[in-house]
Amino acid sequence: MSTIVTAVKGIVQYGTHSLIVQRAAADSGGGTWECPGGKIDFGELPEDSLIREIQEETGLTVTVDRIAYASSLMTHPDRQVILLVYFCTATTQTVELSDEHDDYIWADESTLRQQIAPNILADFERYQIFPQLISS
């Protein structure tokens, strides 16, 4: 049986940097760098889900600013993930990671380009995310 999962991710900005988190080594996709976020719970609004997921994963309180793009990826031959990616602003830069992630970086554009997973980088290029980031 095929499954479609809807998830949200946040391009979390604080000042001139964006937050990326490294998936825990023991997790699926372990070691890869990504934006924080997760699955939408049944009945939950996407923005509320994103605020909750970022809080759970990083301890950060964020404001959801606007949608950046929507994308889709196959995580398994019978599992598709629909991603809704939003620009967010953090109220502080103090991160407290959950067990889902091993590390984090408040990254500038150059570091983002070097660290994020190739499929995320391709989406960032396709949807012209880099020119929209807060820069110094």
Image (cartoon, rainbow, N blue to C red):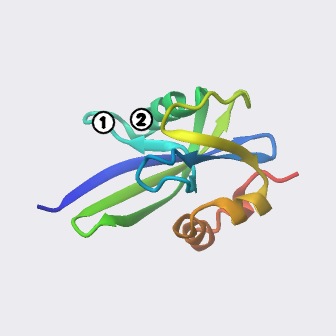
Q: Foreground: 129 or 58?
A: 58
Residue at disc 1, secondary structure: loop
Q: Which mark is residue 60?
A: none
What type is the residue that disc 1 sits on? Answer: Asp
What type is the residue that disc 2 sits on? Answer: Ser
Q: Point out the residue furthest to the left here.
A: 1
Disc count in the image? 2
Q: Foreground: 117 or 134?
A: 117
Residue 124 horizontal/vertical position (percent): 60, 66
Q: Which residue lies at the image location 41% right of the left edge and 35% below the top edge?
A: 49
Is the C-beta separation of discs 2 and 1 under 8 Å? Answer: yes
In the rendered image, which quarter is residue 111 located in? Answer: bottom right
Label 2, label 1: how far apart the Cα atoms are = 7 Å
In the rendered image, which quarter is residue 42 located in? Answer: top left
58 displayed left or right of 75: right
Q: Which residue lies at the image location 34% right of the left edge and 40% below the top edge?
A: 40
Local crowd size for mark 2, using a 10 Å CA cut-off: few (<14), some (14–19), many (≥20) = many
12 up-or-down from 124: above or below: above
Q: Which mark is residue 49?
A: 2
In the rendered image, which quarter is residue 113 located in? Answer: bottom right
Q: Which residue lies at the image location 32% right of the left edge and 33% below the top edge?
A: 44
19 displayed left or right of 135: left
Q: Which residue lies at the image location 51% right of the left edge and 48% below the top edge?
A: 25
Q: Point out the residue furthest to the front here.
A: 26
Chain-order first, disc 2 or disc 1: 1
72 displayed left or right of 124: left
Q: Which mark is residue 41?
A: 1
Residue 54 horizontal/vertical position (percent): 53, 34
Residue at disc 2, secondary structure: helix
Residue 121 horizontal/vertical position (percent): 60, 67
Local crowd size for mark 1, using a 10 Å CA cut-off: few (<14), some (14–19), many (≥20) = few
